[in-house]
Amino acid sequence: MRGHPFLSFRRASRARMAALAGALVLGSASTAGAVAISNLSVFLDAGNTADLFQDAGPIGSEISSDVAVLSSSANAFTTRYQAGVYTDAGGAGSATNTITLNAAYTISFDVIDAVGSAWRLDLVTSRVGARTSVTDSSGESAFSLSAVNGLLGGSGTLGSGSLDLGAIANSQQGNSVNLAFDQSGTASITGTGNGSVTLSFAFSATATTIHSNTNPPGPVGPGGDEAAVRMGNPGNLSSFSAGNYPGSGGRTAAADGHFVDLDLFDLGPIPEPDTALMLGMGLAILAAQGRRRTTR
């Protein structure tokens, strides 16, 4: 018995709709690419304190800072902000002196080959160094670090964790000390498609040499003790050892600073809204035709 023309047409329609649905699914999956990082750069912002070196007279002061990309690949990188904050007072005309580094820098990069794809950035941020004092007078020293404030700009949304780190409270010392700090935190940023991302960080580091006019017996006379915040840049002041590396605590200069370790993950393709709608409509038509056939 030959098939009824209407039944043959209906079977052909179902076959065409199934083929269309399959093609839509394959088309959405094929948009995934090798999501990657490109155009990475790190630079000091305008608000970063300029380098200072004052090594003549009764008060010595030094501030230095720099940034660098330590390593990078298509899906990961590590950057470092390094600095040193050093001061000391002694001799005729010396007085209490406070110097502050206002750290401010930005990491910038593009996420590319991500059209139709979702991605995630996993970050570990850390601030490592030491607050160091050397007693060379009857005075004292003090040092502190403010909280690190991290800001995400451009593409992506902070999904979990934080770019911030807590403050390190002021500590005043009358003896030689080495107070190390090692802070870290994690964050996750998610996004879709190609885009540019910026990560900006800001904090302050303060060192104070506290002057005293007391002149006790022995070689220690009036003045202030050496005060240092060591974050990777060795000190260069004459007659000043608090900023040395390895120095007190046997520190490694390359291991101190503010670090950002980032990894990029490709989360796969995202179905386009129109594609998903067409696929749903096609499946609904196939289901309706199946129900009508069952009824007849």
Image (spheres, grey):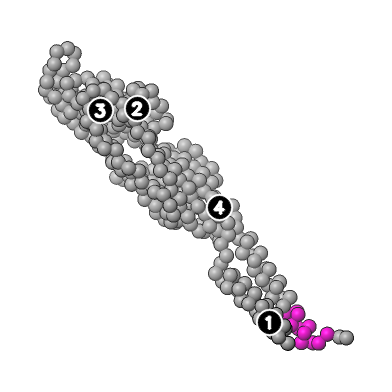
Query: What residue does disc 2 label?
Result: 234
Query: What residue does disc 3 label?
Result: 227
Q: Answer with mark 3 or mark 1, whichever residue precedes in sequence.
A: 3
Residue at image point 45% right, 52% down? 189
Find residue 95 and report its horizontal and vertical position in percent: 14, 28
**How far is disc 1 from disc 4 in space, using C-alphas?**
41 Å
What segment carries the magenta color? 3-13
Q: Answer with mark 2 or mark 1, whichever residue precedes in sequence.
A: 2
Q: Main secondary structure of the magenta part?
A: helix
> Is 215 in front, or is 111?
215
Find residue 177 and report its horizontal and vertical position in percent: 28, 25
Q: Quadrant of residue 233?
A: top left
Q: Are marks 3 and 1 in contact (CB under 8 Å)?
A: no
Q: Amino acid at mark 2?
A: Pro
Residue at image point 40% right, 43% down? 185
Image position of 35 with respect to 105: above or below? below
